[in-house]
Image: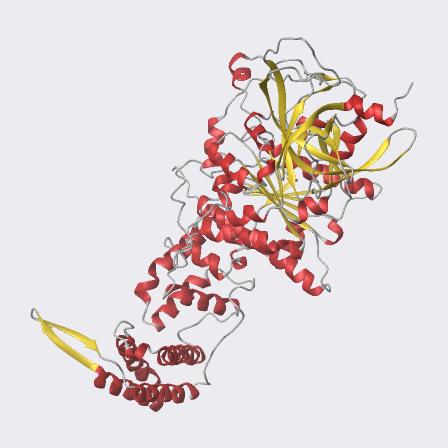
């Protein structure tokens, strides 16, 4: 016999509300309420349970709330439902209370012979009142709460708190507004990242009736964990440093140095802002324009003079406008004196009367403002404020001299940040010539040395050289995916053996090239985007918070700034970001704040827990108290990708599909128990070949000795063995 609706609701009642606020509701549980297992909801279910769900009937439907804590208080007498105890002695009696966090509204939308249908919506407009009853949700209601939301296309796991209801996500929400996967090492973080990619591709392939999806995932893998993770998903492009010769699945990682922009060059070479960076940018513009200067060419000599006079004219105009000619601190007089010295040398070469006029105007101004005094037997020179008419005369003379060599040169050649092929060996040579022209050779020696070291480093050469003649469109096709993703949906870039000196620059270049290529795709395709996902493992290494020092940006800061730009602007161009990190407290606050969805595995560190708590609203922080005790494969999904925060037991990945991030098997190797067996049933012992490791480490071939030269070079200063190789 079925119960009436009122009787059914009464059977599900567990208590009454005795306190209400916008972020907390307190409930007094009935004495008859279940103490450990509920049997009145259709199937046995644990109750009461921390972070479980309960309902409170209201005007718009059922208010859905989550259990934050449960306690016991002492009452003077037992408050039994529907009966009174007369003539009994009042004794203290334990009563249970629990606190709830309101989440949203569950509305009834109809039903059929099998089950009732409900719809959950986040947010609360009307709260219940004191004395209202609190109910346990039925199986249908519980599933409707967890399985809420539109476009639930990809199943990622089940919810242990909701009768193992399926947890599905909308890829547009999960990847479109960036996702952070956070958790301690060993908590299942890498498997979750690999699973999200695989399960999304499986769902897309099913929607295409078995055809490969037109998708693009780029996995930046600093630990070499993902090389074999995506096998069985069609074509997978894997790039690594010095791949094995007999491997057909792994290709040589190439990020040519002509991809680098001026900021990345400046960070790597540690170029100073005042002198070295302008020269470096000029050198990049020249070599990309195919105009590396030859000192014996009259045309190039004239062009060099034109550049020099143009830059000095522009700087002098700036000093006049800013008023620097009136202040001692600006050192304007000493800059004029340096120009006069330069012009004397150039007059001897070019014999131009106009240069004589400019030099005369400068000397007149210097003579009028120059002063000196003797202190402790030493003559100290200084300049008083310069007369504006004298400075204007210098500007007029410089303008006249510039006209004789072709006019002022504001911008010459392609932008230094455009990826145009050039021969890397030309850059330091050309930079030295520019420094000589500017009488600044002593300021760029270290800069040139850093570039030569980069070009000669054998570890870096295979990555940054262009020996295979790769061009930009081929690189984009190989690394981002060809038309219709015909060469595969996933790119794995193994960064594990990239030298530490350039690993941040290489990572920054790959990420920036991905973003800028998608920006140009949208520009050329009427505003349509090409959805792409960039996955960054060990994100705390590459997206680490930095001190904002504009004068000295190192490689790590440049790398972080690229990802900050992707986090802020990537969504508009179809670029989603997935971050995986075990130290969220070290991540850039800008990037973390732009992530709209979070998948939180076990987090034990107090600083990391504190940061994660700041990412969620106050009334949901009770759920995060589970973080230190979450078992492996369990995580809390919250944010834009989920209608409500939910505990998820992630789908299990087969062993051959998991990243290589398992814990070391010490006991198996020590004792021989649990080792893999060969086809004859013999245990495969863990052997080691130190000679093979030494040969690979020292970059020597079979049969070679350590005395064999690594490379044969003509110029020992240009191509030298790597100092970090243990010879």
Residue nearest the viewer, comparing 530 with 150: 150
Q: Position of residue 180 (x, y in %)?
A: 59, 41
Residue nearest the viewer, comparing 657 with 290: 657
Indicate whether 655 appears above or below 520. above
Classify residue 391 by image quadrant.
bottom left
Q: Is residue 271 left or right of residue 410?
A: left
Q: Residue at x 32, y 71 (%)?
A: 439
Q: Quadrant of the C terminus?
A: top left
Q: Position of residue 315 (x, y in %)?
A: 38, 77
Q: Position of residue 645 (x, y in %)?
A: 66, 36
Classify residue 618 by image quadrant.
top right
Indicate whether 595 appears above or below 324. above
Q: Is residue 474 left or right of residue 484?
A: left
Q: Is residue 504 left or right of residue 601?
A: left
Res. 99 in view: yes
Find the residue positioned furthest to the top: 88
Q: Quadrant of the N terminus?
A: top right
Residue nearest the viewer, comparing 573 with 554: 573
Q: Residue at x 30, y 83 (%)?
A: 348
Find the residue positioned furthest to the left: 377
Q: Position of residue 652 (x, y in %)?
A: 69, 28
């Amino acid at each position: 016999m079925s119960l009436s609706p009122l009787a059914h609701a009464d059977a599900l009642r567990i208590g009454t509300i005795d306190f209400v606020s916008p972020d907390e509701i307190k409930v007094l549980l009935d004495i008859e309420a279940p103490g450990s297992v509920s049997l009145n909801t259709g199937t046995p279910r644990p109750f009461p349970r921390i972070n479980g769900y309960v309902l409170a009937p209201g005007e718009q439907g059922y208010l859905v709330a989550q259990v934050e804590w449960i306690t016991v208080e002492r009452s003077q007498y037992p408050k039994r439902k529907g009966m009174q105890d007369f003539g009994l002695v009042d004794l203290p009696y334990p009563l249970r209370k629990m606190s709830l966090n309101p989440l949203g509204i569950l509305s009834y939308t109809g039903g059929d012979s099998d089950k009732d249908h409900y719809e959950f919506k986040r947010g609360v407009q009307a709260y219940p009142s004191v004395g209202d009853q609190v109910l346990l949700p039925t199986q249908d209601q519980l599933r409707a709460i967890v399985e809420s939301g539109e476009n639930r296309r990809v199943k990622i796991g089940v919810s242990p708190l909701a009768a193992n209801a399926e947890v599905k996500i909308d890829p547009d929400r999960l990847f479109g507004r960036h996702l952070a996967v956070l958790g301690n090492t060993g908590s299942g973080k890498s498997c979750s990242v690999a699973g999200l990619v695989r399960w999304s591709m499986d769902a897309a392939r099913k929607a295409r009736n078995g055809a490969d999806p037109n998708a693009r995932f780029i996995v930046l893998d600093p630990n070499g964990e993902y090389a074999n993770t995506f096998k069985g998903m069609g074509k997978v492009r894997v790039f690594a440093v010095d791949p094995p010769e007999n491997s057909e699945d792994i290709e040589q990682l190439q990020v040519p140095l002509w991809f680098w922009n001026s900021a990345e060059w400046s960070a790597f070479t540690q170029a100073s802002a005042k002198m070295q960076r302008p020269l470096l940018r000029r050198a990049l513009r020249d070599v990309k324009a195919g105009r590396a200067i030859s000192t014996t060419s009259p045309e190039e000599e004239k062009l060099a003079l034109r550049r020099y006079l143009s830059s000095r004219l522009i700087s002098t105009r700036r000093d006049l406008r800013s008023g620097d000619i009136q202040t001692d601190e600006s050192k304007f007089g000493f800059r004029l004196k340096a120009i006069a010295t330069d012009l004397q040398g150039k007059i001897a070469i070019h014999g131009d009367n106009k240069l004589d006029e400019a030099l005369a105007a400068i000397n007149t101004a210097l003579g009028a403002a120059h002063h000196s005094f003797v202190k402790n037997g030493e003559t100290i020179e200084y300049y008083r404020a310069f007369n504006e008419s004298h400075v204007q005369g210098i500007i007029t003379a410089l303008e006249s001299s510039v006209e004789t060599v072709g006019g002022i040169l504001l911008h010459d050649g392609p932008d230094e940040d455009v990826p145009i092929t050039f021969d890397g060996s030309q850059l330091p040579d050309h930079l030295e010539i520019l420094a000589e022209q500017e009488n600044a050779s002593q300021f760029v020696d270290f800069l040139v040395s850093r570039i030569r070291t980069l070009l000669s480093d054998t570890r870096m050469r295979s990555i940054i050289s262009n020996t295979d003649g790769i061009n930009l469109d081929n690189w984009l096709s190989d690394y981002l995916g060809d038309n219709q993703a015909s060469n595969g949906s996933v790119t794995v870039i193994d960064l594990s053996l990239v030298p530490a000196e350039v690993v941040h620059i290489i990572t920054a270049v790959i990420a920036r090239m991905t973003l800028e290529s998608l920006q140009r795709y949208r520009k050329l395709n009427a505003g349509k985007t090409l959805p792409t996902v960039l996955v960054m493992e060990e994100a705390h290494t590459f997206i680490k918070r930095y001190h904002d020092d504009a004068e000295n940006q190192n490689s790590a800061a440049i790398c972080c700034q690229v990802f900050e730009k992707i986090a802020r602007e990537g969504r508009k161009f179809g670029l989603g970001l997935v971050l995986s990190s075990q130290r969220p407290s070290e991540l850039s606050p800008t990037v973390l704040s732009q992530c709209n969805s979070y998948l939180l595995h076990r987090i034990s560190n107090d600083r990391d827990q504190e940061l994660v708590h700041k990412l969620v609203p106050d009334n949901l922080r009770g759920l995060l108290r589970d973080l230190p005790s979450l078992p492996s494969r369990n995580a809390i999904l919250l944010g834009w990708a989920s209608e409500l925060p939910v505990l998820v037991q992630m789908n299990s990945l087969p062993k051959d599909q998991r990243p290589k991030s398992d814990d070391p098997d010490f006991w198996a190797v020590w004792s021989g128990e649990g080792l893999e067996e060969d086809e004859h049933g013999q245990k495969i012992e863990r052997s080691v070949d130190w000679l093979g490791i030494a040969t690979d480490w020292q970059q020597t071939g079979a049969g070679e000795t350590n005395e064999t030269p690594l490379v044969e070079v003509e110029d020992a200063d240009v191509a030298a063995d790597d100092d970090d190789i243990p010879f």
